[in-house]
Image (cartoon, grey):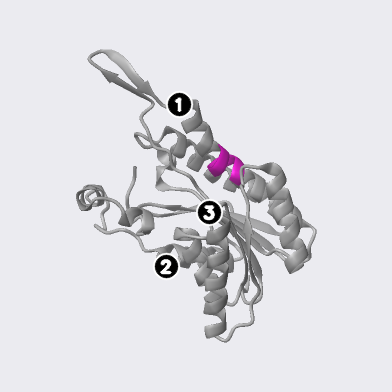
Amino acid sequence: MKLDQKVFAITGGARGLGAGMASHLVELGAHLAIIDLDKAAVEVMAKTLLEQAHQADKNLTIKGYACDIADELQVENTFSQIRQDFGQLNGLINNAGLMRDGMLIKVKDGKLTDKMSLKQWQSVVDVNLTGSFLCGREAAGIMAEQADAGVIINISSVSRAGNAGQTNYSATKSGVATMVVSWAKELARHNIRVAGIAPGMIATDMTAQMKPEAIERMLKAVPLRRMGEVDEIAHTMQYILENDYFTGRVIEMDGGLRV
C-alpha cells in the first residue's frame, strides 16, 4: 500500500507509541484520525500533528476523537464520524492499552493477604481486548465496503507469552495476537490485511518515569542491552503497511528479549 494521502486511525494516539506512529505517518503523507480517551490530549496532539504537516508543506487532514474504546456505542459513533469526515479508512492501528499489574495472589506466613481484584482484571480486558475487538470490527466494516485495500495492525507485547505479575495484561496481549491470525483469515476476501507488532521494552514517557536501577535490571534480560525506540516501532508499522503480502503474522520488536 502506498501511504501518501491514505487515511489511518490510531487508538491511544495522543501519547507514547501511538503519538510516535502518528507522527511517522504524517511524514509519509497520510491523513489521520487520532483516537484517545483524553479529550484535551487528543486536541493537543491533532494540533501538533497539523503543525508538523504544515511545516513539511503537506496538505493533510488530521482530526482528534475522544472515545472510550471499551464502550460499544462510543466506538460505533466514532468510526461512523471518521467515515463521514474522511470518506474512507485505509488502516487502523489498534494501539490503545492499559496496564494494571499485580500478582494473582499474595501470601505471607502461610496466609493469603491479597489477590488480583476482578476490577483490576476487567479494566485491562475491557480496554486491551474488548477495545481492540470493537475498533477492529468497526474499521473492518468500513474497509470491506470500499474499493481500496485496508490494513489493521494490533499492538501486542512480548508479554503475550506470559509474565509474572501480568496475568491480565499478558492474557489480553495474547488475545490481540490471536485476533491477528483469525482476522487475517476472515478478512483477506475483502482485501484487508491484518498484522501485529509485539514490542518489548520501548523508551516512552512511561519508562522514563522508572527508577534507573529498575531499568538496568530489566535491560540485563535484553541481548541488545538497550530499550527500543519509538521510531523503530513506527518503522515496523511502515513495513507492514507497505508490504502487501504481509498478513496474519506478529513481528516481535524486543531486542531479542523472550519473557
101 left or right, relative to 195: left
Instruction: Tell me the quarter of the picture where residue 246 sits.
Output: bottom right
Which residue is tagged 2?
A: 231
Magenta-drawn stretch, dominant element (helix, strand or loop): helix
249 left or right, relative to 71: left
**Chain-order first, disc 3 or disc 1:** 3
Was residue 124 drawn as part of the magenta stretch in this picture? no
For the point 46% across and 34% down, the residue is 168
Question: Going by the picture, which residue comes out furthest to the top?
Answer: 110
Q: CA distance from mark 3 to mark 2?
A: 15 Å
Task: Answer whether labels 3 and 2 touch (C-beta < 8 Å).
Answer: no
Q: Nearer the viewer, residue 201 or 54?
A: 54
**Chain-order first, disc 2 or disc 1:** 1
Q: Which stretch did the figure color magenta?
A: 126-131
Q: Amino acid at mark 1?
A: Ser
Which residue is tagged 1?
A: 117
